């Protein structure tokens, strides 16, 4: 099984600023996924990140707002840009390996 | 597109009793995976149980078991001998087989365990 280290675990940010969330996997994985979980809600897929190509974004999410990097098979970042209070959520990264999916510990973001 | 429906926003169970959480899904695929994840206040997504659609036998993990009805597209989770530590959000999830595909989640069921 894969272990994903995600940081920061939480942050409080001023509106208009940006935050970069990092995920490090302890083994090589082809795809990584970024989810948003708004307060009291389920997980919504933001984008799929494949190493060596641009991320694929779901409807309602755009690269300018949520740029993603995937420089190698064990690492990915998600940036939340020009933040507003509506971006206050938990952000989780995930990786699929064989039949299972693994998750980072999540980042609780509060925008004030 | 695949969808996952959890019709019970909240459930409660007495300690040591049994509770069943419901999940239905919609897909045109014949081979896929189904999961139940537990999310405690720590936010960590914890895999509870996994079912492979081509396996007719229902998956079991200790006190957790599923009732997988492929024709009805139903995938319920039974928790036996409930413990206080079982209190959490439970998410049903679907994943297509073949390739590296993301999970599709239901809205979740908040389970409370009453001492």
Image (cartoon, rainbow, N blue to C red):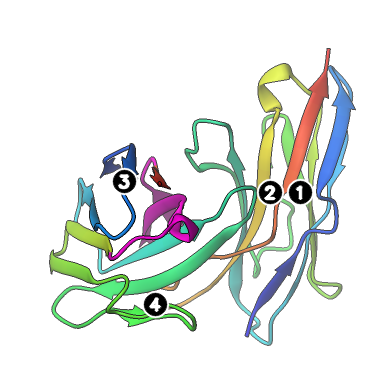
Q: Tag 2 or tag 4, which sits nearer the N-term?
A: 2
Q: Tag 1 or tag 2, which sits nearer the N-term?
A: 2
Instruction: Give the image location of residue A93, x and y in percent.
Output: 36, 55
Front position among marks 3 and 1: 3
Residue B81 makes an appearance in the image: no
Q: Are marks 2 and 3 on the same chain?
A: no
Q: Mark 4 points at which residue?
A: B99
**Separation of disc 3 and disc 1 at Cα?**
42 Å
User: Which quadrant holds the C terminus of chain B?
Assistant: top right
**Separation of disc 2 and disc 1 at Cα?**
6 Å
- From the viewer's perspective, tell me whether residue A105 is left or right of residue A70: right
Q: Name the residue under label 3.
A: A13
Q: Do labels 4 and 3 share a chain?
A: no
**Separation of disc 4 and disc 3 at Cα?**
37 Å
Looking at the image, is B30 positioned above or below residue B73? Answer: below
Q: Do labels 1 and 4 share a chain?
A: yes
**Secondary structure of residue under mark 3:** strand
Residue B66's tag is 1
**Secondary structure of residue under mark 1:** strand
**Separation of disc 4 and disc 2 at Cα?**
23 Å
Q: Do labels 2 and 1 share a chain?
A: yes
- Find the residue positioned furthest to the top: B115
10 Å neighbourhood of mark 2: few (<14), some, or many (≥20)? some
What residue is at 20 percent from the left and 45 percent from the top?
A: A26
Looking at the image, is B12 positioned above or below residue A35? Answer: above
What residue is at 68 percent from the left and 44 percent from the top?
A: B90
The magenta-colored residue range is: A81-105
Which of the 4 image quadrants contains residue A3? top left
Q: Name the residue under label 2.
A: B59
């Amino acid at each position: 099984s894969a272990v994903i280290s995600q940081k920061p675990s939480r942050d409080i940010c001023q509106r208009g600023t940006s935050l970069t969330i990092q995920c490090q996997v302890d083994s090589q994985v082809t795809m990584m996924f970024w989810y948003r979980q708004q307060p009291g809600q389920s997980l919504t897929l933001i984008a799929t990140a494949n190493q060596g190509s641009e991320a694929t974004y779901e409807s309602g999410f755009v690269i300018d707002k949520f740029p993603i990097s995937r420089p190698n098979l064990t690492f990915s970042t998600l940036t939340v840009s020009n933040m507003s209070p509506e971006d206050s959520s938990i952000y989780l990264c995930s990786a699929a390996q064989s039949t299972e999916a693994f998750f980072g510990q999540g980042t609780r973001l509060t925008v004030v | 597109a695949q969808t996952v429906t959890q019709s019970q926003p909240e459930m409660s169970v007495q300690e040591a009793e049994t509770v069943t959480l419901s999940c239905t899904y919609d897909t045109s695929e014949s081979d896929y995976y189904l999961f139940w994840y537990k999310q405690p206040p720590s936010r960590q997504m914890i895999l509870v149980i996994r079912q492979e659609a081509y396996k007719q036998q229902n998956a079991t993990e200790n006190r957790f078991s599923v009732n997988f009805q492929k024709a009805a597209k139903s995938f319920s989770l039974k928790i036996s001998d409930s413990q206080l530590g079982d209190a959490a959000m439970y998410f049903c999830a679907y994943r297509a087989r073949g390739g590296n595909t993301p999970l599709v989640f239901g809205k979740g069921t908040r389970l409370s365990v009453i001492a």
